[in-house]
Structures are given as structure tokens and as C-alpha cells.
Amino acid sequence: MIACPSVRQSDIRGHYNLTTPFYRLLWGVHIHHGLWEGNESSRAAQQNLTETLIREAAIERGARVLDVGCGMGGSSIHLAKNLGCEVTGVTISPVQRWWATQRARWNRVGSRAKFRCTDAEKLEVPAESLDVVWCIECSEHLFDKPRFFEKAAAWLKPGGRIALCAWLAGDDLQSEAKVKDVYDVCEGFFCPSLGSTDDYCGWMRDAGLTVERVHDWTSRVDRTWELCRDRVQKTHMRWLARAIDANTVMFLDRFDTILRAYRTGAMKYGCFVARKPD
């Protein structure tokens, strides 16, 4: 695991409060990578990632789902609208909570997709009340990842699943250049740490979960950062970022870093499905 001790929770909240409009303009309603199969659009690739994770986790119609790190509500609304799931989305950003709530109402699923602004690490959920804990690209922002998986396991009903996608530290980080790239991604994207594939599997197993599926999707998602970098350049968004704060400039400037980290093996993008034993 690579850690960045300088990251604070206030940095994470401030980042999403300020940059949610950037994400919407740069990328779309989902704040996560695209998963490409061919030459489809970025929007189609993002939808493909969501739908592929649904299939991998075998999420059933009407399931009770907790969407940890719900962003602007993309996954929550999709699950509520297409599978009739009862979804609670959690975000640390009041801006994102407001945005997600409005989108759920617009999509006429406001009664099934509800959103809370709270720290996921302090969240209290009744034991064995959930069918699915859904987490796409949020665990990177957690300070105590092993403890989160312990709590998530307690929230799940027997047979319930965690469906998770995460940015990962690579398996071979013996070069200083690779370690620096991972550290710079942590700093630029406000991640207290990035765990490896083995770290995540170990945390889930220690929490009493059975790891059913692990996929390395790195080569299918890295195009995300090519497209985001190019859109920043075309829109001259960096100039606007300079008027906001230094952290937002750093965030945009690290797009090249994460792309390089994926392509050198310094980082990976992983999908995990783990089940609570019956």
C-alpha cells in the first residue's frame, strides 16, 4: 500500500464541492472510469462499467443497496430506475448530495434513490439490512480501509455482496519512479492511500467475506484519462481552475500522471465481488 499522509478529509470534501461541475462538464453524469469493449463513446463506456459490475455481482431486482461514494447519483439512479432497487447513496459532499437528489427527482426515482451527506467511515447502518454494498472508486478516499470492510460485512445480509471497483497500487513497485507516480496520484486526487489487489482481497477475507471475483480492467479503462486530458486542453479549463485554487490545478495536472501510472504498471484498476457466507 502507498500512503499520502498529507491528505485530509477536508481536502476530499472541498475537492468534490468545487470540482463536481468540472466532472460533469469533462465526463458526464457518472464520476467513474469508462470500461471499453471497442470504439464506443465515453458515455457508453461508463454505462458499460456500471452494467458489467451489476452482472458480476448478480444484483437482483428490488435489492437493497448502499452506494458508497455515490457522486452525482449516476449508479444509484441507474439501479433504482432499471432494477427497482431501493438505494441509499452516500457522499461526503453537500454539493453532490443536492445534485444527486435533483437528478433522482428528474428521473422519477426519488422515492427509491435517496442520498445522504455523511462520512462513509462514520456511517451507521443496521446489521444484516443490505443485499449489496456498491462502491465505485470511493475506497481510495477511505482512511481506514480494513475497518470499512469489517463494517460493510456486518451491514450485509447472509449471502449479500460487496461490488467494488478501485484504483490500485501496482504489484511491482520496486522503482522509485513508479512509487512517485502512485504517490503523486494520491496527492493530486486526494487519496489517503492506494492498496494493491492483494491488500483488498486480504481486507475482505479478514472481514469474513468470500472473494468470488477479481478482475484487472486496467487496459480497458485507461482511455478515460486520455479523453479527460484532451478535454481539459481543448476547453482551456486549467485557466479557470487557476481562479479557483491550487488544489484544483494540481488535480487537472495529474491526469497525465495517472495515465502513465496505468500504462507502466505502477497502478491498476480492479473489480472485486465478495460475498457474505450464508
Image (cartoon, helix red, strand yellow):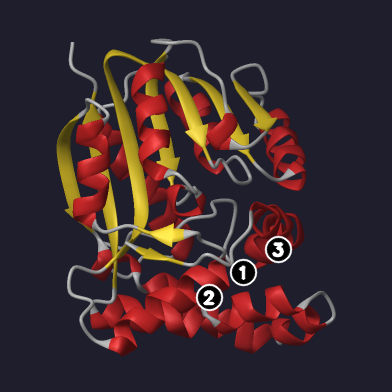
The local secondary structure at tag 2 comes to: helix
Residue 112 percent coordinates (x, y): 59, 18
Query: Considering only order in the chain, which callout, 2 or 1, is on the residue closer to the N terminus?
Result: 1
Query: Considering only order in the chain, which callout, 3 or 1, is on the residue closer to the N terminus?
Result: 3
Is residue 1 visible to us here?
yes
Disc 1 and disc 2: Cα gap in Å?
6 Å
Residue 250 percent coordinates (x, y): 63, 80
Q: Quadrant of residue 74?
A: top right
Disc 3 marks which residue?
19
Residue 175 percent coordinates (x, y): 24, 86
Disc 2 marks which residue?
228
Residue furthest right as drawn: 243
Query: Residue at position x 22%, y 25% from top?
Result: 208
Q: Quadrant of residue 21?
A: bottom right
Residue furthest front as drawn: 5
Q: In which quarter of the image is residue 72?
A: top right
Q: In the rendered image, which quarter contains the C terminus?
A: top left
Amino acid type of the residue that numbered disc 1 sits on in the rendered structure: Leu
Amino acid type of the residue that numbered disc 2 sits on in the rendered structure: Cys
Q: Which of marks 1 and 3 is in front?
A: 3
Is residue 33 visible to us here?
no
Q: Camera-side residue: 86 or 47?
A: 86
Disc 1 marks which residue?
26
Q: In the rendered view, tell whether residue 91 sits above or below residue 238.
A: above
